[in-house]
Amino acid sequence: MQNFYWRWQFKTAPYRFIAPFFILFMVFVFLPFVFSIYLSFTNWHGEEVKTFVGLANYKTLLTNREFWQSLLNSIFIFLLYVPVMLLLALIFASCLSSSWMKWTGFFRTVFFIPNITSVVAISFVFLLIFNSTGILNQVLMNAGFIHEPIPFLETPWWARISVSLLVIFRWTGYNMILLLGGMQSISRSLYEAAEVDGASGIKSFWYITLPLMKRLLAFCTVLSTLGTFSLFTEPFILTKGGPNLSTTTPVVLIYKESFQNLNMGYASTISIFFFMVMMILSLLQLRLFLDND
Amino acid sequence: MNAMKRMSAAVLCTVLMLALVLSGCSGKSGDSKAAGDTAGGKTKITVWIWEDAKNVIDLNMPEFKKQYPNIDVDLHVLAQSDVYQNFLIAASSGDQLPDVVNLESLRLSQMIETGGLLDISDKVAPYKDKMNAYKWADATKDGKIYAMPWDSGPVVMFYRNDLFKQAGLPYKPEDVSAELKTWDDYMKFAKQLKEKTGVAMLAESKSQTDGVFFQQMLWQRDLWMFGKDGSVQLDNPEVIKTAQYFVDLVKNGYVYEVKPWSDAWYSSFQQNKEATIVGASWYEGLLPTLIDPDASGKWSVVPMPKWSADDKYSSAIDGGASLAINKNSKHPEEAWKFIEFMLGKEESQLKMMKEGGLFPSLETTYNDDAFKEKVPYFNDQPIRTLYIDAVKNVAPITYTKDYPLGNELITNAFAEVFLDNKSVESVFKKAADELRQKTGRK
């Protein structure tokens, strides 16, 4: 008897340990996901009856400019911030990993703080900074760089740049930590050998650090891709997706369709389609990884 | 034995886990059963409300408790957008909570559409003729009424008398209302103001307008984004003309460009950037407190300018709210007593106006002396009589359930006009087509 229980317990223990996750996952992720697949075939505005409309929502989605515009916006924002962010992260990381740097623990913390601060709070502070009479415009005008305030949130391209600046502020530290980890795993002896051969600091960065960091940089890029397409809080608070849809990301669009227009069915259609686009993109990127290896 | 114990402990843990998870999603209905039960003859009703509105309701709570000692009211404060989102969830899951929900006119039709509100046609019948007629339109679907009107936002024109005086314009309310009768006059005033003082006539945003200024003009002209038959009207030539007026105002340089309700918008008033607000009665409460607290005596009020002097209607509406009852509420009678006490009773409504600045939809209060009171901040002008004149001359427009979408398309249309230099006509035609496609309207 005892023996049976013991064996039963031994075999099932791992599953019971991971059960809480799967229960939560089922209730809060998987079932809602299945439900929204069903919703995407209906026309539902929150009333009791959901009208089944088949593929009509998908047809609307493919012919409507808004969705494509939102994907395009994400690509623009991605191109605006990813190169700058990775460059900054790389510079900071190599500073922090070099031997002459003092207080590295302190700086690591400082750079990481924006990432764990409430994004809503940060966005509101940036809203004040970017205001047409905000501190950034005041400083630039007093310094004589500009004469008219920059319309940071009022024109499409400036709005995208403002959102990008906010994202850079939030995520540079995170990427820096990732790159720092990578740099510290590069063997010291390579640098020592380079020094003996008479290579300068910049040269050894260019010929040793960078090539060995390639994979990690690619990994950071992949993470940023997913992050950019599902950007929500930053553009929503800064610009509400405007002006004229220029900072509307797919997730902002889903929010607007569901909670502003109460088009729950159509909103589900967007999210399902968006999910598929993201999945294909992720698979492609994973594939690239494998090939690079 | 030991193993048995351990096993039962594991099972217990799992059960507890499950219970936690499940209670997480059904917490609300569980609460309602416990709280909604009449304990010791007392009934508890829950009201979902946003902060400003709760502060005003609080003024009447002592009286309410005296009259209905057996009704406990839980005023549950939520952010405005959360009221709608949470109610949507409550409605679609048949939740008993809240009993009463506070809704803005502009989201009311949408919420009625969800089918979560109780038909209160019989209950409101005695108030049918006592409230502003336009308020019932948005509360009605298929001949049934789902909400009780609370307050109205009749539109007037607030202006800076000191800036008008500097520009050599008439500045006393009686002179201004005599000479600034139409929107053409408004344009002329704007021109002189700009030339003499450099001050803009109003503050608005080109690319992020909230659409209110333009929509008020439409409302006043008995035009709207939708026609009486439900068809889309954004490409109606008269609507396009009205939009063109706003565009001209901006292009002539009479508008100080700032996003309404942004930080820069608030500070622009202290910096004397603009001279008028064409806005609803509730600015009376906001100007002395939030917008321009140091300008006592500098603001005056006149009626809203008209499109042409012989137009039938002279004013418009912005905002206002209603209270409604949840269809699944266990205590609809008590909920109605609460609503009736707060909104149907003249003393309650008057108190909310005097101390909370909400202009009542209840017309039987309009004879009260409080409306003739002089308001110190506005140079001792008895401004509230203007609201009464305004609200009696308002076209019966309904926001409809597609208002939020229409509003967004209007914002985007103006952004396109100003950013891409397109013609008003082409942009509004495009917006109309998009609105038709998305709403299935004609």
Image: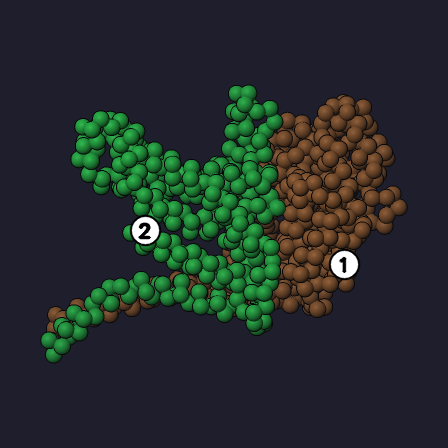
Q: Is mark 2 on a helix, strand or loop?
A: helix
Mark 2 or mark 1: which is in front? 2
Looking at the image, residue B366 sits to the left or right of residue B332; the answer is: right
Q: Which residue lies furthest to the front in this view?
A: A197
**Residue tagged by mark 1?**
B227
Q: Is residue A52 above or below residue B400?
A: below
> Which residue is painted at 14% across and 73% down in the image?
A7
For the residue marked with disc 1, what is the amino acid? Gly
For the residue marked with disc 2, what is the amino acid? Asn
Residue in front for this viewpoint, A47 or B250: B250
Disc 1 is attached to a residue of which chain? Answer: B
Q: Chain A is drawn in which colour?
A: green
x and y percentages locating residue B333 in the rendered image: 59, 66
Characterize the local packing of mark 2: few (<14), some (14-19) or many (20 or more) Cα atoms within 10 angstroms.
few
> Which residue is painted at 68% across and 32% down in the image?
B256
Residue in front for this viewpoint, A78 or B41: A78
- Mark 2 vs 1: CB contact within 8 A: no
**Residue tagged by mark 2?**
A292
x and y percentages locating residue B314 in the rendered image: 81, 46
Q: Quadrant of the C terminus of chain B?
A: bottom right
Q: In which quarter of the image is the N terminus of chain B?
A: bottom left
For residue A27, which quarter of the picture?
bottom left
